[in-house]
Image (spheres, helix red, strand yellow):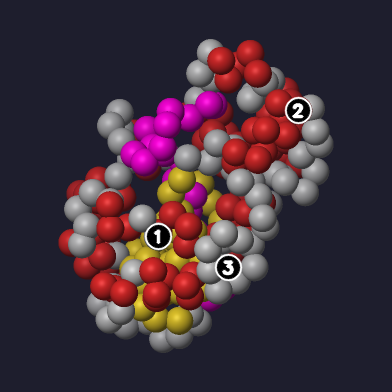
């Protein structure tokens, strides 16, 4: 079984996130891509919405998506949700992490040299890097020349040793920052987040200016 993992803050989850997961699943013929909302994101400021709300929104976003699920694996830690820590937890469960496909947007992967446990991390699992509007996956060949011997253009055959698969695919030009800004401005979220996520945000008054000042709920 080919399983993908897609970690993120998802504050909130939006259509761009879903496009990344779908593109990775198609390109590598993954049986499943599990979204992993982080409890404590390692490379970002504290989320505006609580871990519980972000997990709930991720679950709502994939409830009718074939092959997309949500996992609480990173909800179980009080420390930062480093990818290496997540892989440690999987190994403790007896999972061979070299069979795992870690899905990520190209804009985020561009900072891989600053990640905890780099470069050993690259030998522990496959990475599936999907284009985002601000960064095409194929552009990373130039941006990260040190990884030249690891790149593979997907779709392709998958070797037994971990590689970095580049997926140039169209993904919605949406960011969580843009979504939060639209909410603060009272604008519609149609075409930005799944309808069920928009309903959850409205029901719980998430990302309203007063809530943001208080750091979330």
| Location of residue 206 in the rendering, given as x and y in whole percent from the top left corner | 64, 24
User: Seen in the image, is 204 located left or right of residue 97?
Assistant: right
Q: Secondary structure at mark 2?
A: helix
- Residue 30 visible, this angle: no
Which range of residues does the magenta coloring cover?
Answer: 26-49
Viewer-side residue, 104 vs 113: 113
- Of the image marks 2 and 1, the number of the one nearer the N terminus: 1
| Location of residue 92 in the rendering, given as x and y in whole percent from the top left corner | 20, 49
Look at 50% across and 82% down and name the residue there. 155
Query: What is the number of the mark on residue 38?
Result: none
Disc 1 vs disc 3: Cβ atoms closer than 8 Å? no
Structural crowding at the residue carrying mark 3, measured as other residues with C-alpha within 10 Å and reported as few (<14), some (14–19) or many (≥20): many
Tell me the residue that label 3 is attached to: 23
Give the quadrant of residue 103.
bottom left
Residue 27 within the magenta-colored segment of the rendering: yes
| Location of residue 20 in the rendering, given as x and y in whole percent from the top left corner | 56, 60
The N terminus, quarter of image? bottom left
Give the quadrant of residue 185.
top right
Viewer-side residue, 146 vs 131: 146
Tell me the residue that label 2 is attached to: 185
- In the image, residue 119 sits, relative to residue 148, either above or below, namely above
Q: Secondary structure at mark 3?
A: helix
User: Seen in the image, is 178 located left or right of residue 117?
Assistant: right
Look at 60% across and 41% down and name the residue there. 176
Tell me the residue that label 1 is attached to: 110
- Of the image marks 1 and 3, the number of the one nearer the N terminus: 3
- In the image, residue 193 sits, relative to residue 199, either above or below, namely below
Q: Secondary structure at mark 1?
A: loop
| Location of residue 30 in the rendering, given as x and y in whole percent from the top left corner | 49, 70
Q: CA distance from mark 2 to mark 1?
A: 31 Å
């Amino acid at each position: 079984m080919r399983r993908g993992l897609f970690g993120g803050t998802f504050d909130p989850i939006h259509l761009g996130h879903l496009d990344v997961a779908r593109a990775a699943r198609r390109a590598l013929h993954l049986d499943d891509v599990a979204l992993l909302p982080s409890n404590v994101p390692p490379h970002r400021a504290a989320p505006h919405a609580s871990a519980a709300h972000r997990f709930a929104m991720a679950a709502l976003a994939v409830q009718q998506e074939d092959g997309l699920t949500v996992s609480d694996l990173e909800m179980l830690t009080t420390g930062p949700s480093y990818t290496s820590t997540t892989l440690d937890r999987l190994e403790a469960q007896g999972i061979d992490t070299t069979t795992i496909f870690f899905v990520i947007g190209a804009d985020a992967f561009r900072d891989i040299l600053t990640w905890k446990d780099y470069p050993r991390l690259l030998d522990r699992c496959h990475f599936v890097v999907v284009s985002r509007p601000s960064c095409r996956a194929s552009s990373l060949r130039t941006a990260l020349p040190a990884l030249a011997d690891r790149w593979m253009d997907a779709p392709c055959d998958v070797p037994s040793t971990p590689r970095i698969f580049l997926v140039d695919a169209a993904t919605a030009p949406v960011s969580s920052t843009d979504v939060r800004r639209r909410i603060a401005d009272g604008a519609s979220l149609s075409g930005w987040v799944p309808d069920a996520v928009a309903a959850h945000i409205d029901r719980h008054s998430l990302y309203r200016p007063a809530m943001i000042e208080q750091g979330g709920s």
